[in-house]
Amino acid sequence: MPKVKFKLPTIKREAEIMTSFCKLRKTGWDKSRTVYKNHPELGKILKDKKSDDYYKYVHKYSSNFIKKNKKKLEKLVKEYQIQWDKINDEYLKTLSEHFETDYPADRKIITAYVSIVPIFPRFLDSWSFNVSSKNPDFMIPIAMHEIVHFLYFKKWMEVFPKTKRKELENPHLIWRLSELLAPIILNHNKDIQKILKYKHWHYSVFQKVKIGKKTMIKHFEGLYKKHLKNGEPFEEFLKTSWAEAKKHRKIIENI
């Protein structure tokens, strides 16, 4: 069973990720406001700067911020590790059994970076992700969500081996489906809820979208609940969900 190991990222890594979210996107996926809400001083610094020049300013800001808060961040790493270790084996085993696939033999460690970036991306190739250094209460839910993606996409590639690597990322339909299904699985799988009773959030851009008379979330929740009730293989649920996603492609891709 893999172990999740918490650590501090390099300043370079923090600056690169932060910079990517600082740049304005003319879609519902823009996260720049979230960055500036959590780092108002950075917002002031970048206000009159060209986006191509953001990185050097973000790097300097990140370096100063991390140095100033280093003891606090190091303490969080230790605290998070203690908290997570209590559920690591049970949670990872539950996911493996539910998705009906094993962890890769070469994945002994899943890395969780305790980050100052207020958005929490996951990186499929390295099996790593970010958690919040500002909101400790959200650490376990964030980690649970991001870890779902690693094993979910491993199973996906077993079921749909012709999928291109780029299709597993934003803005592709397969990625959007994964982000839609992850909270549904976490919220409605009884074994997962026994580990942590928690209502996992959906992207706000998903919440008002409708398929017929139901919200998109309710539509896919219905599919998952039916899957659980019928006790069918997870592979069949993936096939059903993918067929529905393609059927409603225009709605989902227009978000």
Image: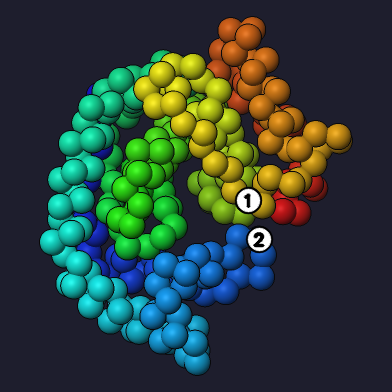
Q: Residue at x 28, y 39 (%)?
A: 110
Which sits in the foreground, 126 or 98? Answer: 98
Q: Position of residue 150 (x, y in %)?
A: 41, 37
Residue 8 to residue 218: above or below: below
| Colour mapping | rainbow
Q: Label 2 sits on what residue type?
A: Gly
Q: Quadrant of the N terminus?
A: top left
Q: Position of residue 190 (x, y in %)?
A: 49, 16
1 vs 2, front mark: 1
Residue 16 to residue 172: above or below: below
Which residue ends up furthest to the right in the rendered image?
Answer: 212
Q: Position of residue 41 (x, y in %)?
A: 39, 80
Q: In the rendered image, which residue does mark 2 sit on?
A: 28
Label 1 secondary element: helix
Residue 95 to residue 11: above or below: above
Can the viewer see residue 246?
A: no
Asked if residue 64 lies left or right of residue 17, the reply is left
Residue 148 quadrant:
top left
Residue 253 to residue 161: above or below: below
Residue 210 quadrant:
top right
- Classed neighbour count for the residue bearing mark 1: other residues with Cα under 10 Å, few (<14), some (14–19), many (≥20): few
Residue 134 quadrant:
bottom left
Q: Which of the numbered marks, if any, corresponds to residue 204?
A: 1
Which sits in the foreground, 213 or 92? Answer: 213
Q: Residue at x 23, y 27 (%)?
A: 86
Of callouts 1 and 2, which one flags the residue occurring earlier in the amino acid sequence?
Answer: 2
